């Protein structure tokens, strides 16, 4: 019975790698390594970008939640304010008590996040005319826009509409 057959002639004829083969191997290994590095860099950049978007969205939503907890207007009954923004004596944010007090508020390095800026706009809209922009006159509906900017990403914008009677739409 023949279990194993070695061919000494063949073994004896094997040679080491040539310089050319070694160079090709090193080139392939280097290219593979560089490709892997690029893939990891891309994945890291995407993860960082996703994290940034999450932080920016949360910063915008946090501010929106605070604004929406306030009264529709400084006046508790019509007519509503013709001048938007903080009212007399409301010199700091802690004194804001209606949603349009936040109009024009700009915060830098928001909540300790260096390079992040948050801007608020509040204005009257008329749904039958233009839901996107100010109509320039007093209505029963205000639009709140909170935008968060960072130095390295597209801005994140959160919008909400509030009516004088109840919240009618948020998106
Ligand atoms: Ca106020
Ligand atoms: Ca106000």
Image (cartoon, rainbow, N blue to C red):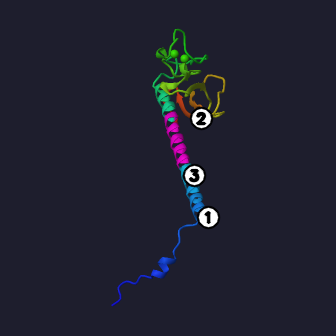
Looking at the image, which residue sits at the far left?
1
Decide which of tag 1 and tag 3 comes sooner along the chain.
1
In the picture, residue 32 is in which quadrant? bottom right
Residue at label 2? 152
Residue at label 3? 34
The image quadrant where one finds the N terminus is bottom left
Q: Residue at x 48, y 33 (%)?
A: 58
Identify the magenta region: 40-56
In the picture, residue 2 is in which quadrant? bottom left
Residue at label 1? 20
Decide which of tag 2 and tag 1 comes sooner along the chain.
1
In the picture, residue 18 is in which quadrant? bottom right
Which dot marks residue 113? Answer: none
Q: Position of residue 91 (x, y in %)?
A: 52, 11
Decide which of tag 2 and tag 3 comes sooner along the chain.
3
| Between 138 and 14, the one nearer to me in the picture | 14
Q: Position of residue 168 (x, y in %)?
A: 51, 34
Name the main secondary structure of what is drawn in magenta: helix
Instruction: Describe the element under mark 3 as helix, strand or loop.
Output: helix
Label 2, label 1: how far apart the Cα atoms are: 46 Å
Q: Nearer the viewer, mark 2 or mark 3?
A: 3
Is disc 2 in contact with disc 3, using a CB cutoff of under 8 Å? Answer: no
Q: Residue at x 57, y 49 (%)?
A: 38
Instruction: Describe the element under mark 1 as helix, strand or loop.
Output: helix
Q: Residue at x 42, y 82 (%)?
A: 6
Instruction: Describe the element under mark 2 as helix, strand or loop.
Output: loop
Label 2, label 3: how far apart the Cα atoms are: 25 Å
Q: How many marks?
A: 3
Q: Position of residue 70 (x, y in %)?
A: 47, 22
| Between 157 and 8, the one nearer to me in the picture | 8
């Amino acid at each position: 019975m023949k279990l194993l057959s070695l061919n000494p002639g063949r073994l004896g004829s094997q040679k080491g790698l040539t310089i050319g083969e070694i160079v090709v191997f090193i080139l392939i290994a280097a290219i593979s390594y560089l490709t892997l590095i690029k893939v990891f860099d891309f994945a890291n950049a995407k993860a960082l970008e996703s994290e940034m978007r999450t932080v920016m969205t949360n910063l915008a939503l946090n501010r929106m939640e605070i604004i929406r907890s306030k009264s529709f207007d400084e006046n508790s009954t019509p007519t509503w304010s013709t001048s938007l923004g903080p009212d007399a004596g409301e010199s700091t944010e802690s004194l804001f008590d209606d949603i349009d007090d936040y109009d024009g508020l700009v915060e830098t390095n928001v909540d300790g996040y260096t390079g992040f800026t948050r801007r608020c706009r509040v204005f009257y809209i008329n749904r039958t005319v233009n839901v996107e922009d100010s109509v320039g006159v007093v209505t029963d509906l205000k639009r709140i826009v909170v935008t968060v900017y960072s130095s390295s990403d597209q801005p994140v914008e959160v919008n909400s509409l509030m009516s004088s009677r109840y919240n009618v739409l948020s998106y």
